[in-house]
Amino acid sequence: MKILYLGPTEGTAIQRIMALRRLGHDVTVVDPHLGRSVPLIPERLIDAWCFRTGAIGIEWLVARYVAKQIGNATFDVAFVDHGDLLNASCIAHLKTIAKVVVNYNQDNPYVPRDKGRWRVFLTALPLYDLIATHRVTSANSAARAGAKRVLLTREAADEAVHRPIELSSEDLARFSSKVAFVGTWMPERGPIMLRLIERGVPLRIYGPRWQKAPEYEQLRSHVVLGELKGDDYVKAIRGASIAIGLLSKGNEDLHTTRSFEIPAIGTLFCAERTSDHLEMYKDGEEAVFFDTVDECADLCLSLLKHPDRIKEIADAGLKRVHKNGDFNEKLVMKIINGALKG
């Protein structure tokens, strides 16, 4: 099929683009964020403005940019990833050049966490042929907001990126750890990390913004600042005996991409106990789950005394994630086929 992909060209979005291409589709990529430039205004200020206001005064620039990039081309599917900058007139235009227009959004536009960022998306939502989301709460909110059709999915790991790679001696020197958390600082995460350290968990934290944590001075020796991309992200997880997965409370998450990426990389997944996680993995056999930070500490400290048990659970988790099929190729085709069968 001829697919127009509109979304960011970084992060996990790149993985979805490549998944579509691996499946043999002809994919044209347009990044709406490239259409936001305003002379003499720094990019960081534009970012802040779009996040706080939903691109007031800028959305028309994006719509013009997208139309110019598309030109006279037509497509079987327009696949919008997130859609925070695409207004109703832009989606209406897409419907004239594509058989179906779908939206897949990993974030949660229906809660106040991201301030005004989703203003434009919410006005355009009723025009999409299909809205795909991985949260029941988001699916219900999308329906109330006027979505024609809503598809409940799971997030996914990537077939090509997330795999049990072999680490070199240099990799092990850089990434070897007993327990790792890979993720951005959020206000609720600092106290969790600090408590784990206080309990004696040999923790290493990778990710951006941790210097903003009120607990940073106590965490500093455990933190490797900066975002990990590509194989460095995989190596940091692969180099750990146990990798912790945390959820965004503000986003109402019951699982995230880490829920699949960590087991797919071949590392033991230790995460918050939720209905989604319990549906995906057998607790204590294919992953380990906790309700409190002290239970997390107890699990980590106990398991670290039994390396063979860690390997057994990690291997079982790897088999389970592949059995479940929670990978990008299946995800993107579920969304596209769901829209075309509409």
Image (cartoon, rainbow, N blue to C red):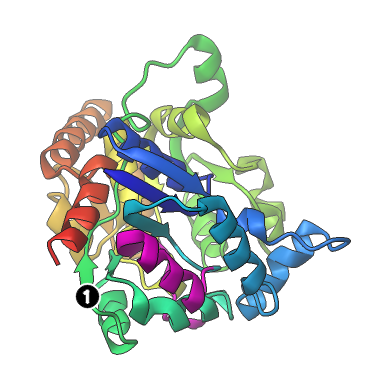
Left or right of 20? Residue 281 is: left
Q: Is 97 within the magenta?
A: yes
Name the quarter where the N terminus is drawn: top left
SS state under label 1: loop
Residue 3 image point, x, y percent:
34, 47
Q: Is 303 within the magenta?
A: no
Please tell me which residue is depicted at 25% across the width and 41% down the height of the picture: 329
Residues packed near mark 1 inside 10 Å, few (<14), some (14 to 19) or many (20 plus): some
Residue 320 image point, x, y percent:
14, 40
Residue at the extreme right of the image, as rendered: 40
35 to 181, vertically: above or below: below
Residue at the extreme top of the image, as rendered: 169
Relative depth, front residue between 116 and 240:
116
Left or right of 37? Residue 327 is: left
Relative depth, front residue between 89 and 335:
89
Q: Is residue 245 visible?
A: yes
Residue 90 image point, x, y percent:
49, 70
Please tell me which residue is depicted at 52% across the width and 55% down the height of the picture: 193
Residue 166 image point, x, y percent:
38, 16
The total number of labels drawn is 1
Q: Which residues are magenta?
A: 86-112
Please tell me which residue is depicted at 22% across the width and 75% down the height of the picture: 149
Q: Is residue 201 visible?
A: no
Mark 1 highlights which residue? 149
Q: Quadrant of residue 127?
A: bottom left
Please tell me which residue is depicted at 47% across the width and 75% down the height of the picture: 121
Residue at the extreme front of the image, as rendered: 72
Q: Please state which amino acid type lies under the numbered disc 1.
A: Arg
37 to 162, vertically: above or below: below
